[in-house]
């Protein structure tokens, strides 16, 4: 199986001028070994998120969220849709979270001075499950609390149209640092293509995360990701979409949050109208009356240029 090895997966931008690291056919499985968001810096509680100690933090913006790619898909062209099927994510034996002064929304807290007075790094050990691997393993938060490992890809996308976008704060219809917990095994990601071959990248795997990634980091980890790529020819998308086994999700990122929510919802309505034979009136009324319609707030981090990421989701059983 073709693979991008971890030491190769150290790009920090989605760049249409990069030479492809892999060339694959439609439906061909391949793997990317990813670094964690800190490129291996965080190994113990003694590794603090002090910018002066972290490699790449002498740059603006800092070099974080390393990604592997680009992957060139034969037959992909501008104006097509890339279909990314996530087959498997196998995480490392630990993950980490790092907080401290001027990091995240409480990095200057006076209510809880311990959050802003010093840097804190927590290491979470991963315990293999019945399979003997971390595919069904457990994350140990502390001596009392644990939960199943629920991995997803935090940063993924294709090279943008003309600009070069960083993997730490780049976001757009093409993908980027979106921290969508539904970018998970068993789901499909749909992305518009802007360059021949699509030029696909991914990295920044999380072992788990709740809504918003409130501190600015979650359970950051190394991983091996197995995926395959396919195409929908000659069709445009307004923004990223996700298909889960039982639902569809329209994604958007913007500030303020209500703009992300409104645009994700209207894009979902467009999906219902163009592909599921809904009238605009029925689509509009459905998202206001269906008890299973959901707005997911995936990422709402007060850090740098990051916009807020929302997803409008509807179960497939309502699609007819």
Image (tube, helix red, strand yellow):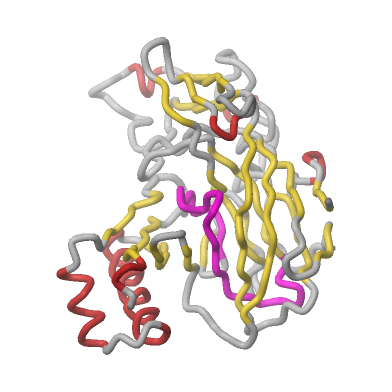
**Magenta region includes residue 187:** yes
Residue 246: quadrant of the picture: bottom left
Q: What are the residue bounds of the magenta stretch?
A: 175-199
Please name whichever residue, 10 or 90, is drawn nearer the observer in this view of the structure: 90
Residue 160: quadrant of the picture: bottom right
Please name whichever residue, 99 or 178, is drawn nearer the observer in this view of the structure: 178
Q: Position of residue 48 (x, y in %)?
A: 56, 20
As displayed, is residue 279 above or below residue 148? Answer: below
Q: Position of residue 34 (x, y in %)?
A: 70, 41
Q: Viewed as shown, does residue 195 lie left or right of 98? A: right
Residue 131: quadrant of the picture: top right
Residue for point 15% across, 69% down:
289
For the image, the number of numbered tags is: 0
Residue for point 42% across, 65% down:
251
**Magenta region includes residue 217:** no
> Principal SS element in the magenta part?
loop
As displayed, is residue 8 above or below residue 83? Answer: above
Q: Where is residue 167 in the image (x, y as percent from the top left)?
A: 61, 52
Q: Position of residue 279 (x, y in %)?
A: 27, 89
Q: Viewed as shown, does residue 46 lie left or right of 250? A: right
Residue for point 61% across, 54% down:
86
Residue for point 67% across, 70% down:
230
Of all residues shown, which one is farthest toward the top?
143
Q: In the rendered image, which quarter contains the C terminus?
A: bottom left
As displayed, is residue 38 above or below residue 198? Answer: above
């Amino acid at each position: 199986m073709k693979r991008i090895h971890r030491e190769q997966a150290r790009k920090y931008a989605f760049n249409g001028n990069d030479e492809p690291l892999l060339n694959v056919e439609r439906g061909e499985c391949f793997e990317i070994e990813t670094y964690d968001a800190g490129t291996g810096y965080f190994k113990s509680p003694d590794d603090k998120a002090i910018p002066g100690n972290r490699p790449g933090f002498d740059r603006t913006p800092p070099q974080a969220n390393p990604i592997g790619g680009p992957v060139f898909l034969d037959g992909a062209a501008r104006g097509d849709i890339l279909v990314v099927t996530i087959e498997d994510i196998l995480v490392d034996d630990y993950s980490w979270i790092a907080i401290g002064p001027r990091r995240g929304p409480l990095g200057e807290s006076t209510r809880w001075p311990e959050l802003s007075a010093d840097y804190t790094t927590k290491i979470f050990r991963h315990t293999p499950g019945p399979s003997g691997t971390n595919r069904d393993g457990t994350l140990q938060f502390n001596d009392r609390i644990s939960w199943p490992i629920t991995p997803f890809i935090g940063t993924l996308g294709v090279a943008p149209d003309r600009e070069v976008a960083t993997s730490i704060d780049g976001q757009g219809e093409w993908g980027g640092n979106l921290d969508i917990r539904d970018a998970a095994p068993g789901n499909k990601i749909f992305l518009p293509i802007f360059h021949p071959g699509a030029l696909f990248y991914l990295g920044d795997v999380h072992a788990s995360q709740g809504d918003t990634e409130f501190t600015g980091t979650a359970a950051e980890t190394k991983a091996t990701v197995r995926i395959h790529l396919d195409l929908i020819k000659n069709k445009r998308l307004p923004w990223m979409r996700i298909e889960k086994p039982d639902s569809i999700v329209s994604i958007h990122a913007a500030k303020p949050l209500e703009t992300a929510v409104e645009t994700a919802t209207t894009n979902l309505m467009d999906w219902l109208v163009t592909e599921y034979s809904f009238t605009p009136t029925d689509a509009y009324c459905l998202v206001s009356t269906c008890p299973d319609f959901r707005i997911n707030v995936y990422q709402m981090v007060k850090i740098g240029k990051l916009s807020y990421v929302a997803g409008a989701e509807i179960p497939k059983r309502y699609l007819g």
